[in-house]
Amino acid sequence: MSKEINFEQKVIAIQSELKAPKSQYNSFGKYRYRNQEDILEAVKPLLKKYELSITLTDTINETPSGICYVEARAILHGTDGKIESVAQAGIDINKKGMDVSQSFGSSSSYARKYALNGLLLIDDTKDADSTNNHATTKLPELKDESTEYKRAVAHMKKGGNISAIKKKYSLSPALQIKLTNIKS
C-alpha cells in the first residue's frame, strides 16, 4: 500500500470492498445463501492487503432454563486496534439425523457466520423487493476533484458526516477514506 492508513480506515476499506457472493444453493427452498467458508474465502485477500487478521472463537453456554447455545466471537485485529462482533446460536442435541458433535458443529458454524456478518457489515436479509423485476436506482459515482466532490469536501469541513454523502453518491473505498480524513 502506498499510503499508510490507520486501523479504522482499514476496517472501512475492508467493509466497503468485501464481496461475499452467495455461492451455496438450497434446492428445497430454492434460494442462494453464503456460509462461513464463503465469507472467509472472500475476506482473506483483503486481510492480506490491509495487514489485518481475524480470529474466531466459540464458547458453549447454558441458559438458566437449561438451553445450550454457542456464542461465537469474530475479532478483527490490527497493530493499532481491534473490533469484535458476537452472535449466538442454540444447540439442539436431539436434532434428527445428527449426532451430538454435529449439532454443536452446526450451531458453531451458524453463530460464526452471523458474527462475521456483523463484523464485516454483511446484510443477509432478503428484502421484499428482491424477487420482483423492478429496476433499481443506482447512485451516481462521486468523482475525485469534481464539483460534487468539492461540495462534499466543504460539507466535511463544516463538520458533516460521510453518511449524508453516501446517501447521494456511490463512493470508492479510497475516496471514502479521503473524505473521512477531512477535519472540520
Image: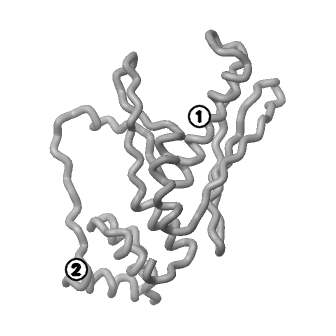
**Residue 131 found in image quarter:** top left
Indicate which disc residue 160 carries.
none
Q: Position of residue 86 (x, y in %)?
A: 65, 48
Residue 58 sits in quarter? top right
Relative side of 23 to 63, left or right = left
Q: Work out whether 6 lies above or below 20.
A: below
* Viewer-closest of 133 and 114: 114
Which amino acid does the dot numbered 2 rest on? Glu
The residue lying at 33 percent from left, 71 percent from top is 165
In three-dimensional space, the C-alpha distance between marks 2 and 1, rounded to whole angstroms, equals: 43 Å
Residue 139 falls left or right of residue 99: left
Residue depicted at 42% across the width and 56% down the height: 18
Q: Which residue matches tag 2?
A: 148
Q: Earlier in the sequence, mark 2 or mark 1?
A: 1
Residue 168, image quadrant = bottom left
Left or right, 167 with reference to 13: left
Identify the image's colour scheme: rainbow, by chain, secondary structure or one colour: one colour
* Residue drawn at point x = 71 percent, y = 46 percent: 57
Answer few, some or many: residues within 10 Å of disc 1's Cα (few below 14, many 20 plus, some between 14 and 19): some
State the residue at coordinates (56%, 41%): 113
Quarter in which the C terminus is drawn: bottom left
Say if 108 sits above or below 178 in the image.
Answer: above
Q: In the image, is residue 11 above or below residue 123? A: below
Dot 2 crowding, Cα within 10 Å, few <14, some 14–19, many 20+: some
Which residue in the protein does label 1 denote?
110
Front in this rendered view, residue 162 or 79 = 79
Where does residue 108 sit, x and y in percent of width and height?
Answer: 66, 34
